[in-house]
Image: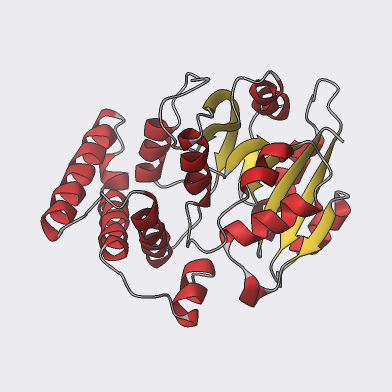
Amino acid sequence: MDASIVIRTYNEGKWLGRALEACATQEAEGLQYEVVIVDSGSTDDTLQIAEKYGCRITHIKKPDFTFGRSLNVGCDFAQGRFLVFISGHCIPASDQWLANLVRPLDEGKCAFAYGRQMGEPGVTKFSEEQLFKKYFPEHSAIPQEGFFCNNANSAVPKAVWEQYKFDEEVTGLEDMVLGKQLAADGEFIGYVADAPVIHLHDESWSQIKTRYEREAVALQGIMPEVHIRAGDFLRYTAAGILFDWSEALSQRAFWREAGSIFMFRLMQYWGSYKGNNDHRKLSQDRKDRYFYPR
């Protein structure tokens, strides 16, 4: 088996069918591949959809779930020599997605590759679309500078995963923990713009805040030099809102998007501020809130 597409799921029925259909129709340039589902207790039709598409399914108990642990379970279960990761709400946007994402690994140009992320009109919030444009540009960098990467659309040789594995304790950013370890050991990370996915975050405002909060908690261990103070929170929030309002004006979408922009940037930076300044040991209740936000 050449590649295993590993997808973490928890009640992903809304988007999983589209994701698996896109996986099934890849022009994989001779690559033999499978799809592995790591499910943590879905109560919707996630598992039925996965079975319909012939996925290999493994499980992790809900109390045992962390982002890194679930990926390690899936990687251990997978049979491919390349491990490819997408979220259950990410849809490959090209029939060359898999081949393009794996190619720099196969050619030895990098030890970890991640692809472009885009939004979808009518689903993706305006401000998140601006973040996608910032962090996932139109042009590849193989290899890139630094250790930024993102597991929502990425790949790693199984041999590399076996050497490093994902951190099972962090509340998020397990991809960047691995990226930092690889970079410290002289390995390279590649950004592959022509391996795009549509990343569908259909979240409430409180879920957005929780996502950025748990990622900021994790960032304390990855980049302890980063401190977000109250003044930073106010400055970043204002700058983000004003930038997005300007973009919305240029797209003649200001009146439609102004309120959403205000709320997104407020929740983004309020969550980041809280997470960056929270140094308590995580209780089970907070873990549940971070991993299963409502």
In the rendered view, tell whether residue 104 sits above or below residue 66. above
Query: In percent of the image, x 48 and y 34: which residue is there?
Result: 183
**Quadrant occupied by the N terminus:** top right
In the rendered view, tell whether residue 60 sits above or below residue 68: below
Question: x and y percent of residue 43 in the render?
Answer: 71, 73
| Quadrant of res 276 | bottom left
Q: Nearer the viewer, residue 149 or 52?
A: 149
Q: Is residue 1 left or right of residue 234?
A: right
Is residue 104 left or right of 217 when viewed as pictured?
Answer: right
The percent coordinates of residue 83 (x first, y second) are 72, 40
- Residue 266 or residue 220, whichever sits in front: 220
Residue shown at the point (65%, 36%) measured from the top left = 155
Residue depicted at x 26% and y 61%: 270
Q: Position of residue 209 (x, y in %)?
A: 36, 62
| Residue 283 visible in the current orientation | yes
Q: Is residue 38 left or right of residue 146?
A: right
For the view shown, which residue lies furthest in the front direction? 185
In which quadrant of the rendered view does residue 128 lie?
top left
How far across and down, in percent of the image, does residue 288 sit? Answer: 51, 75
Q: Is residue 266 left or right of residue 184?
A: left
